[in-house]
Amino acid sequence: MRALIPWLTHVQFGLVLSSPLQRARRTCDLFRLRRQAEIEPDLAEWDYGDYESKLSSDIRQQRPGWNVFREGCPRGEMPAQVCERADRLIARLCMMNENVALFSHGQFGLALAARWIGLPMVEAQHFSIDTASIGILGYNSAHPQVRVVTLWNATPTRFASSA
C-alpha cells in the first residue's frame, strides 16, 4: 500500500467518502485522506445476515451453487438492496465534476463497479478485488457519457510493476 500513497498525493480529490465501518476508515487514514472524508452509509459492506463471518466455501457446502450476487443472504441484504445502494451512490457521483475517493469493502466494491458500467448485479461475480487495492471508475475520453473501469484491482505489487 505504501507504494500507492505517493501516487495518490498528486491527485486532488474534491470529495472523499468512506464507509462507516472501521476497516474502510482505517484505510482512508493510511492514505492520509481521513481529514477530508465524509462518512457515507451507502459504502458499507454487504450485510451478510446469517452468513456473517462465514466463508463462501462453507456456505456452499450447505447450499451448493450459492452466489451472494444472485441470492443474497438470509436476514441480511438481497442483491436488489445492494444494487439500490450502489445506484444511489452512482447518481450522487455522476453529479460531481471532480475526482472522488471512495473507501469501501470487497463485495460492495464489486457491485459498485458492475453497476457503474451498467451491468446487472449478478455480473459483479466476474470482478475480483484484493484487500487495499485501488480501482478507478471514470469515463471514456472519446465518449464522455460512457462510464468505464479505468483501473482495477491495483495493489502495491501490481502498481509498482506497471508504473
Image: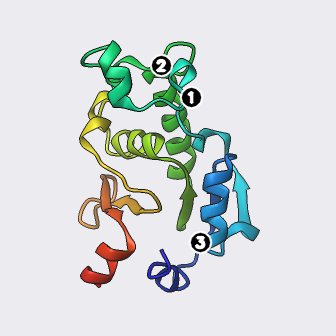
**What colour scheme does the image use?**
rainbow
Residue shown at the point (52%, 23%) measured from the top left = 81
Q: Which of marks 3 and 1 is nearer the N terminus?
A: 3
CB atoms of marks 3 and 1 within 8 Å: no
Find numbered disc 2 in the image and state the secondary structure of the residue it sits on: loop
Residue shown at the point (47%, 19%) measured from the top left = 73
Q: Earlier in the sequence, mark 2 or mark 1?
A: 1
Q: Is residue 98 left or right of residue 15?
A: left
Quadrant hosting residue 25:
bottom right
Residue type at the position of mark 2: Cys
Task: Pick the residue in front: 146 or 30.
Answer: 30
Residue type at the position of mark 3: Phe
CB atoms of marks 2 and 1 within 8 Å: yes
Q: Name the residue under label 3.
A: 13
Task: Pick the residue in front: 29 or 149.
Answer: 29
Residues packed near mark 3 inside 10 Å, few (<14), some (14 to 19) or many (20 plus): some
Q: Name the residue under label 1.
A: 47
Residue shown at the point (53%, 67%) measured from the top left = 99
Find numbered disc 1 in the image and state the secondary structure of the residue it sits on: loop
Residue shown at the point (60%, 41%) measured from the top left = 44
Mark 2 and mark 3: Cα distance apart in space: 34 Å
| Quarter of the C terminus within the rendering | bottom left
Q: Is residue 58 left or right of residue 132?
A: left
Q: Name the residue under label 2.
A: 73
Q: Which mark is residue 15?
A: none
